[in-house]
Image (cartoon, grey):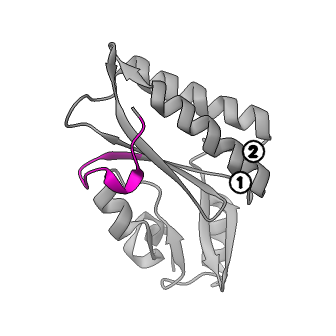
Amino acid sequence: MLVNFSALPNESRIWIYQSNRKLSKEEVEYIDAKARYFLNEWTAHGANLEAGFEIRYNRFLIIGLNQANASASGCSIDASVHFIQSLEQKIGVDLLDKMNVTFYTGDFIAHKSLSEFKKMAKNRSVSPNTVVFNNLVNTKAEYLEHWEVPAKDSWHSRFLA
């Protein structure tokens, strides 16, 4: 059952999928339509899942699930991964690779491989104050408070000199 993302409780589980490039307006519209359909039909053992989503910065798809009523099962999580894979294939983007880092460079958002980010940290091209996207947050509350944070306050800090 699709609900507005803002209506999900702060304890809701979230998954963040980052694109390896900025999405076009048409691609965002496509993802929006497909996510609406998928989440409206998403179930776990026959029970409707109360889920919502948002697309941020033409780059991130954030899916939230209110687990108070029903939790995602192995099969429903598999279904969500297949959904994301279908988006990847249709649009030609990478949404599942967690070995990439997305961060601000001035007003722009950059996307680099983890190895490139490590090199940038070693060369001091990124600093402890570089704002990164911490896609490892697990709940909506963590997402709202700790998603866009200085590198020194996230798991990225291990790469800083």
As displayed, is residue 115 above or below residue 33?
below
The image quadrant that residue 106 belongs to is bottom right
- Gap in Å between the C-alphas at discs 2 and 1? 6 Å
Q: Nearer the viewer, residue 86 or 138?
A: 86
**What span is colored magenta in the figure?**
2-14
In the visual, does 137 lie left or right of 58?
left
Local secondary structure at mark 1:
loop
Q: Where residue 156 appears, x then y in whole percent?
A: 48, 67
For the N terminus, the image quarter is top left
Label 2 sits on residue: 93
Task: Report the residue at 69% width, 51% height from top.
Answer: 28
Q: Earlier in the sequence, mark 2 or mark 1?
A: 1
Label 1 sits on residue: 20
Whether tag 2 and tag 1 are in contact, CB under 8 A, the answer is yes
Task: Report the residue at 62% width, 35% height from top.
Answer: 34
Residue furthest top as drawn: 46
As displayed, is residue 73 above or below residue 64?
above
Residue 148 shown in magenta: no
Predominant SS of the magenta segment: loop
Local secondary structure at mark 2:
loop
